[in-house]
Image: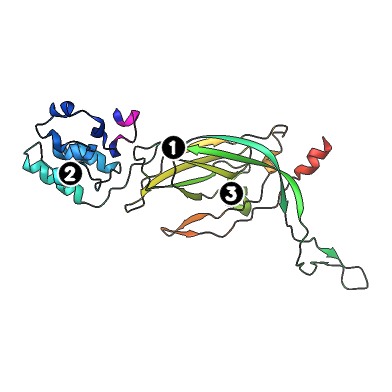
Amino acid sequence: FVCERHVTAIHENFTRDMHHWELEWDSLRWFDLCNATALFLACAFTKVNVVEWLMHHGVDTEIECGHHQKAADTIGLCNGNEEENEKILALLGQKRMAFKAPRQPTGTAKASYEEKTFYPEEESQKIQEGEGTDAMTPPPPSANPTPVKRTVAVCRATFGWNSYWIRPRILFQVRYRIEESVCSTAEAEDDEDEMKLRRWKYEEVLNHNIVIRDMLPGRTYAVQSRAQNTVGGAWSDWSEAAVKKMPLPKGMPNSEHAILKETSRRDLIEETDGRREEAPVVNMQRTKFDMTQTLHSR
């Protein structure tokens, strides 16, 4: 209950603000319990199930409490059960447990129009008859391509999640992808750009929230998160996926978002054969629907 209401409680020296007479009710050795953490107290009173729960939720075993003692120094201080003392000592000495998965993310999203600059390849030019062939031949590459400005629909989404282990050294990984497709499964497999959109994209943050700027308006996304203690330990399981449909900008017909694809410029982290590596920048299909023309025609 305490952790539900105050999620940082398992990491704090919460007896620091308690009066001495309050601690005297719990133990004759109340002076050893000053400035204590939850793990410190659980070890002192030999509560094996509490120690195991705290370890599984990422508690730090190296925090110093009263008289510069650590949790391992107080095992059995207020309880003489040798068998349980050995169990707690084994728990404190084992490798760091993988954290429990974060809770299901929640998010909000906002769609709007933005003017962006693109650098498309120069169009092919037809060689006039008598100077070569009638075939479409690409021109020589230009050192200074002409920029093209387009008004495109963009969507920014903010997702957040809760966990018990709010610590400065907690690393979160977030992944997201399009959950549904505007075309059938067979068509999607033939559409390379559509398949790229449906792959997981990964980002790492040290916060309990993230702002994602490359989601497409009108599409439905799945978002998950997981955690790792940056000083060691395995990744937790992925959280339950949050499924959210991105909004459309005001004035954009529902029938037009299906063919809208924006160039995505983001460094992604992909998992390959169980290892993480930097993925190259992914250039999506050139926008099929020129939003500029639509705005001018209205």
> Which label number is shown at residue 161?
1
Which of the two residues, 264 or 46, is positioned nearer the viewer here? 46
> Which label number is shown at residue 67?
2
Three-letter code for the amino acid on which mark 3 is drawn: Leu
Horizontal side, residue 124 vs residue 191: left or right: right
- In the structure shown, which secondary structural element does the residue marked by tag 1 occupy? loop
User: Is 157 rendered above or below residue 132?
Assistant: above
Instruction: Name the N-terminal-most of marks 2 and 1.
Output: 2
Residue 43 screen position, x and y as percent: 16, 40
Does residue 261 show up magenta in the picture?
Answer: no
> Which label number is shown at residue 197?
3
Task: Report the magenta residues as a range.
Answer: 3-9
User: Is 53 rendered above or below residue 120?
Assistant: above
| Residue at horizontal 66 percent and vertical 48 percent from the top | 262
Which quarter of the rendered picture does the C terminus lie within?
Answer: top right
Residue 259 screen position, x and y as percent: 69, 43
What is the CA distance from the residue labelled 3 to the residue labelled 2?
A: 56 Å
**Other-residue count near label 2 (Cα within 10 Å), few / some / many at <14 / 14–19 / ≥20:** few
Horizontal side, residue 284 vs residue 221: left or right: right
